[in-house]
Amino acid sequence: MLTDWRRERFIRTILRKLSHQRVATLLQPDNVWVIEKAVMSGGDLEGALRTCHMRGWVEPLADSVPIGALTPDGRLPVGKLFSGHGPIYRLTEAGWNVIHRTHEWVVVTCVASIIALFATIVGLVVRMR
């Protein structure tokens, strides 16, 4: 089990990895998406994805999608292409804001503005004396 800060770091790492996914091609005739840089399931990943979903950072784009992996040399496996089913997640606006640390920037900007306002008021008061 990971410590609290390591778990949070892992969750944010998974969120960033989700942002790098992209559709490489579609397999025909069933229009199956081949996703590059896909986040594969296993271990603590499911819990991290569910946590991101609970926080509103991701949402399922499609449920019960066929899942499989390429061979180590990057080719399609011989025989059975898919090893199971699972969801495809997409980032929400809140998820993108977490990745770009928008909230932290807003807080820092507000603090800097308040300090500047306070310094201006102090400067005016000192000047008026």
Image (spheres, rainbow, N blue to C red):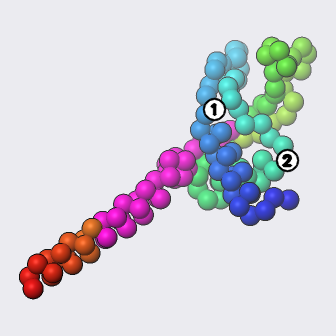
Name above or below for residue 50 compared with residue 61: below
Q: What element carries label 1?
A: loop
Quarter of the N terminus within the rendering: bottom right
Name the residue furthest right: 79
Tag on residue 43? 2
1 or 2: tag closer to the N-terminus = 1
The Cα–Cα distance between marks 1 and 2, rounded to whole angstroms, is 20 Å
> Picture coordinates of residue 54 (x, y %)?
65, 59
Q: Nearer the viewer, residue 63 or 38?
A: 38
What segment carries the magenta color?
88-115
Tell me what residue is drawn at x 85 percent, y 47 percent. 43
Tag on residue 79? none
Tag on residue 21? 1
Tell me what residue is drawn at x 77 percent, y 36 percent. 40
Name above or below for residue 56 compared with residue 78: below
Name the residue furthest left: 128
Magenta stretch encompasses residue 79 = no
Quarter of the C terminus within the rendering: bottom left
How dense is the environment of label 2, judged by Cα within 10 Å: few (below 14), some, or many (20 and up)?
few
How dense is the environment of label 1, judged by Cα within 10 Å: few (below 14), some, or many (20 and up)?
some
Would you say 86 lies left or right of 80 here? left
